[in-house]
């Protein structure tokens, strides 16, 4: 069994949809990025790639490649699953946290869990997602951005 960690952060900005864990969350701002800027899915992908010692999402999906412009990150997560399988690994479990002052994530966590589990073809009981604020401290607390952290385990396929 191998363990990986991932972290991602994006700036909140006007004129973008807020997509987290593949769920569209109503909010007056979205996250700025080359893709849909889904911080949770990006952190999960980096944790999986790291556990398998296969680099990071920038290596596999560079922001210099136009085919990834505004792409739905859940599609990239499906590709990460395929990369893992080609390298002899399968996903065991995911534990992740989203850090945001606003909006509240709780109403969307079950959908996020399902989206990630479906993309990885694992049971939803193997995907844990939590949300927290920073009590108005730091860039998340000042509502300038949102971050996410993930830990995963992978094992031989």
Image: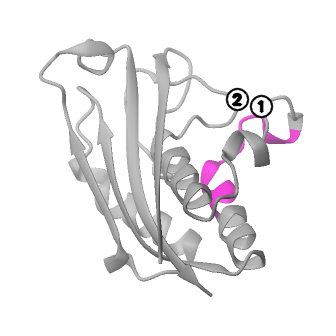
Q: Is residue 26 left or right of residue 71?
A: left
Q: Are marks 1 and 2 in contact (CB under 8 Å)?
A: yes
Colouring convention used in this rendered image of the protein: one colour
Residue located farthest toward the bottom when viewing the structure as drawn: 157
Between 88 and 73, the one lying in front of the other is 88
In the rendered structure, find residue 34 and report the number of the disc placed on it.
2
Q: Is residue 131 left or right of residue 65?
A: left
Residue 12 vertical position relative to residue 89 in the rendered view, above or below: above
The residues tagged by marks 1 and 2 sit, at their Cα atoms, a distance apart of: 6 Å
Please tell me how crowded label 2 is: few (under 14), some (14-19), or many (20+) other residues with Cα within 10 Å.
Answer: some
| Residue under the point 36% across and 76% down | 126
Between 50 and 68, the one lying in front of the other is 50
Give percent across and percent down for residue 116. 48, 64
In the rendered structure, find residue 63 and report the number of the disc placed on it.
1
Quadrant of the rendering where the C terminus is positioned: bottom right
Between 130 and 152, the one lying in front of the other is 152
Query: What residue range appears in magenta?
Result: 67-77
Q: Main secondary structure of the magenta part?
A: helix
Residue 155 vertical position relative to residue 7 in the rendered view, above or below: below
Please tell me how crowded label 1 is: few (under 14), some (14-19), or many (20+) other residues with Cα within 10 Å.
Answer: some
């Amino acid at each position: 069994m191998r363990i990986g960690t991932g972290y991602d952060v994006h700036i909140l900005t006007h004129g973008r949809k807020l997509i987290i864990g593949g769920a569209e969350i109503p909010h007056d701002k979205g996250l700025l990025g080359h893709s849909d800027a889904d911080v949770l899915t990006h952190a999960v992908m980096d944790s999986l790639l790291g556990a398998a010692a296969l680099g990071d999402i920038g290596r596999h999906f560079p922001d210099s490649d136009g085919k990834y412009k505004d792409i739905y990150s859940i599609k990239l997560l499906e590709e990460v699953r395929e990369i893992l399988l080609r390298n002899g690994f399968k996903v065991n479990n995911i534990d992740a946290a989203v850090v945001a002052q606003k909006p509240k994530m709780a109403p969307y966590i079950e959908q996020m869990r399902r989206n990630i589990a479906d993309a990885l073809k694992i049971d939803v009981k193997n995907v844990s997602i939590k949300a927290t604020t920073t009590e108005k401290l730091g860039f998340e607390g000042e509502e300038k951005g949102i971050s996410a952290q993930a830990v995963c385990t992978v094992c031989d396929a």
